[in-house]
Image (cartoon, grey):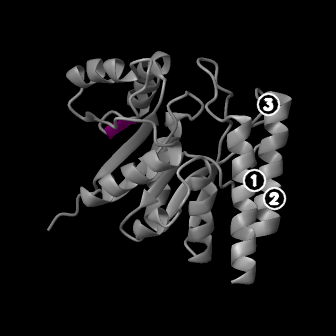
Amino acid sequence: NIYIMKKILIIPTFNERENIKTIYKKIRKYNKNLKILFIDDNSPDRTIDEIIKLKKKDKKLNYILRMKKKGIGSAHKFGIKWAAKNKYNLCITMDSDLTHNPQLIPKMIKFSSKYHLVQTNRFLDKNSLRTWPVHRRILTKFRYILLNVLLNISCDSSGAFRCYNFDILNYKLLLKAKNNSYSFFWESIYILTKEECKIKELKMVQKYRVVGSSKLKISDWLHGLYYLFEIFLRDKFK
């Protein structure tokens, strides 16, 4: 039997109409044959219309429309479960806001054979966040330090640009992350760290988004902080 590795790129979207065409072109520039799955939570700006236009020209592109906004973490878990159920070996995830560079995808795929997860790290390059507003840089660094101190997570655990290897990683571990918002990212890394999964990190300069506005509100950040302490206390005293 010839072993064929099935790969899928999953991109959750919500109000990214202006970015879809650009991110698609960038992906295709470096990844001509990669299958793409957009998961849209019924964006009010009709992001789905742009995705449907792209699908008409590209048979390797597909989409799933969920009828309401359920959270970024929920979209990732939905995509991960879908990829595993459809027998994909590699599941790559990324943001649709042009902050992730698709040029890194072939490199992620190359490293994936030896690791449960290959992901990017915004702290390996001191200039990585130079285009970000100062308050966002401080908050991101603060979260990184807190996660390291409280949960002993040494990698950059709050980013969505990842490549999971389902040949060696049990996808159900990722679904154990209860959070359906942004805390899904660090919670899933915490679970993988406890399971002693091998994680490879790649250096990445991450631009701040230019088109549209960040979905991460201060309330999300505060809820994430509360959730972090909740998990820390739960695991410390169980």
Callout 3, which amino acid?
Arg
Q: Is residue 38 magenta?
A: yes
* The label number, if any, that marks residue 102 in the structure image: none
Disc with the residue nearer the chain's start (1 vs 3): 3
Type of the residue with mark 1: Leu
* Residue 132 position in % (x across, y down): 76, 29
Q: Position of residue 85 (x, y in %)?
A: 26, 59
Q: Is mark 1 on a helix, strand or loop?
A: helix
Mark 1 near mark 2, Cβ–Cβ under 8 Å? yes
Crowding near the residue tagged with mark 1, few <14, some 14–19, many ≥20 C-alpha atoms within 10 Å: some
- Crowdedness of circle 2 by 10 Å Cα count: few (<14), some, many (20+)? some
- Tell me what residue is drawn at x 62 percent, y 52 percent: 183
Mark seen at residue 225:
1
Q: Find the distance from the CA under tag 1 to the CA under tag 2.
A: 9 Å
The image quadrant where one finds the N terminus is bottom left
Circle on res. 130: 3
Q: Earlier in the sequence, mark 1 or mark 2?
A: 2
Residue type, numbered disc 2: Leu
Magenta span includes 233 = no
In the image, which residues are magenta?
35-39
Which residue occupies 41% across, 19% down? 21
Which element is circle 3 on? loop
For the residues labelled 1 and 3, the Cα–Cα distance comes to 24 Å
Q: Foreground residue, 233 or 213?
A: 233
Residue at left offset 44%, top offset 38%: 12
72 horizontally vs 57: left or right: right
Is residue 88 visible to the viewer in this orientation of the structure?
A: yes
Which disc, if any, is residue 146?
2
The residue lying at 56 percent from left, 77 percent from top is 195
Tell us which disc is closer to us: 1 or 2.
1
Of helix, strand and loop, which one carries label 2?
helix
